[in-house]
Amino acid sequence: MGAVRARVGLWIAFLVIHAGLAWLCLAAPGLPLGDVTLVYRPWSIQLASGSPVVGIDLDWVYPLLAHVPMQLALVAGESVYAEAWLVLMTVLDAVAFAILVGDGSSRRRGGAAWWWLAFIALLGPISLGRIDSVTVPLAVVAVLIVMRRPTAASILLAVATWMKVWPAAILVAAVLALRSRWRVVVASAVFSFGVVFLAFALGGSAHVFSFLGEQSGRGLQLEAPVSLFYVWQTAMGVESASIYYDQAILTYQVAGSGIDVVIALMTPLLVVVVLAVALLGAAAVRAGASTIRVLPSLSLALVLVLIAVNKVGSPQYLTWLIAPVVLGLAWQGRRFLVPAALALGLGALTHVVYPYLYWMLLWAWPPMVVVLTVRNVGYLVLLGWCVVELVRARRAAPTRRPPAVVRDELAAHHP
């Protein structure tokens, strides 16, 4: 009976929170569903009408499979595109949530499920209002099955990566941390080859990888950690600094003295930091640290690098934290409470900034800039925790352990 009550309580909370978020998406100020109605819907109509297709005939900011959920939301008609999108997001979340909760008997999984609900409630309507919202449940399912079904998990992560690049961070972590790494590599590579082959067959050879260039060629987005220097300059009235709207990529960016140098340095810096964190994770695995200990922290660290060392700092990036934290709570329980709590704080701070009061940040109002600063520093604090945890995992690992020990540990910690 206890497990049944726990499961019922979780599902009631799931429905209430998703209904509340959907209402905010449709009715709250600040256009929280603006990308869906003003950007995704026109793209979907363009594809359905036989016009030139972004990603095939034209360069696109997203990988090719992002078309799939956008087109699915169009099935019910143009007039209800927003509502259909929210239903689709809720259904995808429900599938992943059901796999996480299971029969309700696992306290760790139950705790991870409650954390997920609390996080999206604190983060607000952006949790459902972007293409990232599609990739999150795919990544959650993938991390939950990755030990027992690495091939299926790899394909799910590859699907998600071909919608939005960030799940590649979890793929990298899985390749480094799992003994079945070659199954992960082969499955994701074969799937990716299939996507590229399809794009070539449709005549999109010149545009299928355009999302990489679209991202690397961007300026500094307003909310990105690296932009704080210029945001504070704007807040203090420095004439050379400003916040402006880029019509080409439909986002707010910062301008200021020396910014071209900073823009040029960010992509190489991102690559260097990703490699450094990956090497740290590989060192922990090589020293004999368990997958149970390494994979959640390494996944979270790599995802955080993609957020913290990035020219772009969109609020929906916070949803990327869900899968690694859910994995950490499901596998490690209390050991993962610190990053879970920090992530909740980051979600709440992001909700303060976006969407309702975003105009205050556009005006560089100092109190709102303070909120953004605390949030962005929080990224670095959480990344620091992950790095320390990986170092501790390496130092605590006595020797390499045989596969049987890993299986026993999985059975004990991941029912």
Image: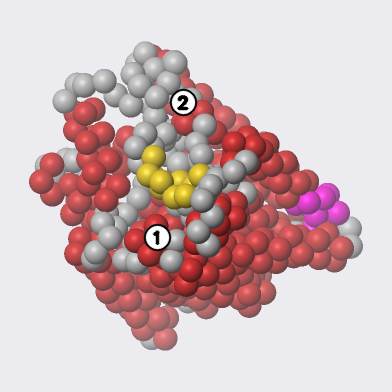
Q: Magenta part mainly helix, strand or loop?
A: helix
> To which residue does mark 1 refer?
363
**Residue drawn where x is 26% and y is 20% of the image:** 52
Q: Could you tell me which secondary element the residue under label 1 belongs to?
A: loop
Rate crowding at label 1 as few (under 14), some (14 to 19) or many (20 or more) other CA atoms within 10 Å.
some
C-alpha distance separating marks 1 and 2: 33 Å
Q: Closest to the observer: 355 or 321? A: 355
Give, as a single range, the part of the protein colored magenta: 280-289
Percent position of residue 261, x then y: 64, 37
Q: Could you tell me which secondary element the residue under label 2 belongs to?
A: helix
Quarter of the figure with the N terminus: bottom left
Rate crowding at label 2 as few (under 14), some (14 to 19) or many (20 or more) other CA atoms within 10 Å.
many
> To which residue does mark 2 refer?
210
Would residue 113 be found to the left or right of residue 278 on screen?
A: left
The magenta stretch spans residue 321: no
Q: Closest to the observer: 263 or 199? A: 263
Whether residue 180 appears in this view of the structure is no
Would residue 407 be found to the left or right of residue 105 on screen?
A: right
The magenta stretch spans residue 281: yes
